[in-house]
Image (cartoon, rainbow, N blue to C red):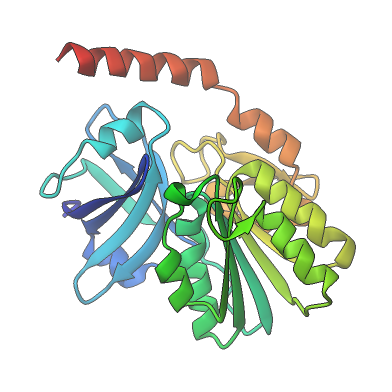
């Protein structure tokens, strides 16, 4: 249980793992996540379940190395186990046949939007997916997204592959062209989700975002993951992680995500020194 079955690098600092988790694999639904710890003193890390295989009893996760805990995770190998693995947590995505939907993923957020696109496609929706990255070498899951989409558009900030520009520009072009869009699902960095919501708001296109708020216990007890939605306090772990993007206070979310930047940098530097010393 909690054993790493398979591990591979998807791009620079982005890692995919297949974990032995039969109970979670049987129950998980698109949009839900797990909390895991590398060891007894490790940080509790929330990660979306990208895929699952109930027959094999496995789940797939994808993460980006951004700090000490994810750096430690990236050093783990197939055969090793996590001390704790809890899930599935959070509310699953509301999957219905909305009609024509657009699924947008930026950076590692592509790994989060993939199970949503797959579930929406299975429910009978016409799925247009837009995925983006800073440059071609950082793009992940292109083939997988192509398989669950009726149409896939790839965008890179530097123009090294696909559309030259941001995913928001692709969406704006679709709207300007008069394409019918019944719902948008947008997952990625906070600035990206904020811009996409600004694009869809004037047209009244409902836009669902998945928030990556700071999280500790994931049971609604600690309040660390609180966000403001439609002027009301919500807890990402039990009320989310998905919310109506037009109602999210992105300024507050961005501010809270920056709260511990100094401590995170210090922790990462100490970890690097420790590894270098070894």
Q: Quadrant of residue 150?
A: bottom right
Picture coordinates of residue 186, whole percent (x, y): 63, 59
Q: Quadrant of residue 5?
A: bottom left
The residue sitting at 26% across, 74% down in the picture is 54
Indicate left or right for 177 with 82 as reference.
Answer: right
Instruction: Specify the farthest residue to the front.
Output: 160
Instruction: Specify the farthest residue to the left.
Output: 79
Picture coordinates of residue 168, whole percent (x, y): 71, 56
Above or below 39: residue 12: below
Above or below 55: residue 191: above
Q: Nearer the viewer, residue 127 or 222?
A: 127
Res. 83 visible in picture: yes
The residue sitting at 78% across, 80% down in the picture is 180
Above or below 175: residue 200: above
Q: Nearer the viewer, residue 97 or 76?
A: 76
Picture coordinates of residue 9, whole percent (x, y): 29, 48
The residue sitting at 30% across, 18% down in the picture is 271
Res. 205 visible in picture: no
Q: Quadrant of the C terminus?
A: top left
Count of picture labels: 0
The residue sitting at 18% across, 11% down in the picture is 277
Q: Quadrant of the N terminus?
A: bottom left
Picture coordinates of residue 238, whole percent (x, y): 54, 52
Indicate left or right for 239 with 176 as reference.
Answer: left
Instruction: Specify the farthest residue to the right.
Output: 202
């Amino acid at each position: 249980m909690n054993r790493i079955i398979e591990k591979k690098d998807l791009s620079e600092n982005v890692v995919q793992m297949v974990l032995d988790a039969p109970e979670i694999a049987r129950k998980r639904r698109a949009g839900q996540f797990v909390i895991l710890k590398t060891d007894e003193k490790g940080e509790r890390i929330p990660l979306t379940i990208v895929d699952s295989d109930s027959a094999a009893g496995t789940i797939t996760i994808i993460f980006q190395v951004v700090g000490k805990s994810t750096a430690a995770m990236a050093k783990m190998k197939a055969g090793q186990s996590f001390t704790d693995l809890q899930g599935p947590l959070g509310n699953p995505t509301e999957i219905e046949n909305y009609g024509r939907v657009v699924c947008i993923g930026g950076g590692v957020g592509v790994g989060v939007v993939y199970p949503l696109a797959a579930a929406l496609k299975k429910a009978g929706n016409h799925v247009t997916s837009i995925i983006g990255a800073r440059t071609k070498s950082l793009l992940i899951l292109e083939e997988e997204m192509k398989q669950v989409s009726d149409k896939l558009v790839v965008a890179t900030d530097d123009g090294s592959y696909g559309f030259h520009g941001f995913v928001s520009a692709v969406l704006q072009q679709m709207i300007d062209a008069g394409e019918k869009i019944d719902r948008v699902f947008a997952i990625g960095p906070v600035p990206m989700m904020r811009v996409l919501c600004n694009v869809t708001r004037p047209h009244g296109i409902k836009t669902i975002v998945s928030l990556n708020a700071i999280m500790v216990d994931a049971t609604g007890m600690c309040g660390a993951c609180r966000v403001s939605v439609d002027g009301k306090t919500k807890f990402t772990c039990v009320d989310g992680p998905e919310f109506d993007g037009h109602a999210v206070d992105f300024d507050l979310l961005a501010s809270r995500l920056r709260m511990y930047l100094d401590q995170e940098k210090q922790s990462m530097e100490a970890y690097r020194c420790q590894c270098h010393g070894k």
